[in-house]
Image (cartoon, rainbow, N blue to C red):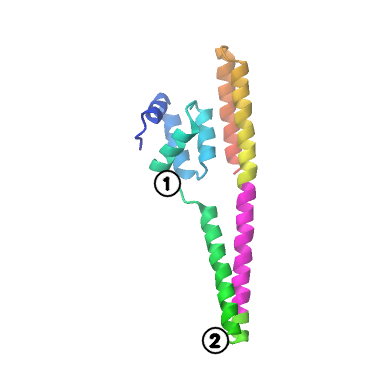
């Protein structure tokens, strides 16, 4: 278990073994820090977002797939422009360039579509999870002090969380 932050260590130690292992596996396999934070809140994390983000960044580095796709899109656009310039400078025959440009354009459109899908999916999912978190906080606030209701709500939150995760 990778931990350098004492506050996070305390949170993880307070979890039972199954929840701790499930949480750490979730952190390892999830790209979104927001989803990780919301899951942590469901299982009792009440510290700040920034602290958890620093811990995740240090212990579980993530690739930013959207950023990589955007960088590839820019490179593809540059390749198409370069090829067109070579045709204009008579360095490449137009018929040979046409096939290559068509291929690059198709790949470029695919990257753009994939980036848009990724963005829409992330935005939609983020809104749903943020709404679920808001409801969770409000209900905990309303029933503060009534341990029976709080315990029942916690079980319900975990069930809702599991359903949201399955929708991925």
Which contiguous range is marked in magenta? 99-121
Q: Earlier in the sequence, mark 1 or mark 2?
A: 1
State the residue in front, 29 or 159: 29
Image position of 110 with respect to 98: above or below: above
Residue 110 % position (x, y)? 62, 63
Q: Looking at the image, which residue is at 61% across and 15% down?
A: 143
Residue at the disc numbered 2: 91
**Residue 23 seen in the current view:** no
Residue 102 % position (x, y)? 63, 75
Q: Residue 145, located in which quarter of the rendered image? A: top right
Image quadrant where one finds the C terminus:
top right
Q: Looking at the image, which residue is at 60% across and 78% down?
A: 84
State the residue in front, 92 or 98: 92
Residue at the disc numbered 1: 61
Q: Is residue 95 left or right of residue 67?
A: right
Find the distance from the CA under tag 1 to the CA under tag 2. 44 Å
Residue 17 % position (x, y)? 40, 29
> Closer to us: mark 1 or mark 2?
2
Q: Looking at the image, which residue is at 53% across and 54% down?
A: 67
**Tag 1's secondary structure?**
loop
User: How many neighbours does mark 2 have within 10 angstroms: few (below 14), some (14-19), or many (20 or more)?
Assistant: few
């Amino acid at each position: 278990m990778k931990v350098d932050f004492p506050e996070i260590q305390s949170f993880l130690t307070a979890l039972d073994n199954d929840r701790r292992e499930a949480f750490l596996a979730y952190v390892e396999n999830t790209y979104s820090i927001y989803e990780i934070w919301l899951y942590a809140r469901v299982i009792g994390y009440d510290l700040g977002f920034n602290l958890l983000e620093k811990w995740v960044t240090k212990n579980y580095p993530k690739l930013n797939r959207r950023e990589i796709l955007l960088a590839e899109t820019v490179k593809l656009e540059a390749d198409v422009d370069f090829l067109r310039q070579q045709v204009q400078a008579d360095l490449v025959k137009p018929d040979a360039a046409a096939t290559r440009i068509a291929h690059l354009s198709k790949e470029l459109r695919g990257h753009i579509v994939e980036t848009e899908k990724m963005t829409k999916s992330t935005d939609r999912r983020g809104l749903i999870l943020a709404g679920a978190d808001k409801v969770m906080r409000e209900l905990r606030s309303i029933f503060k002090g009534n341990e029976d209701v709080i315990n029942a709500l916690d079980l319900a939150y975990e069930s809702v969380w599991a359903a949201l995760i399955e929708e991925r």
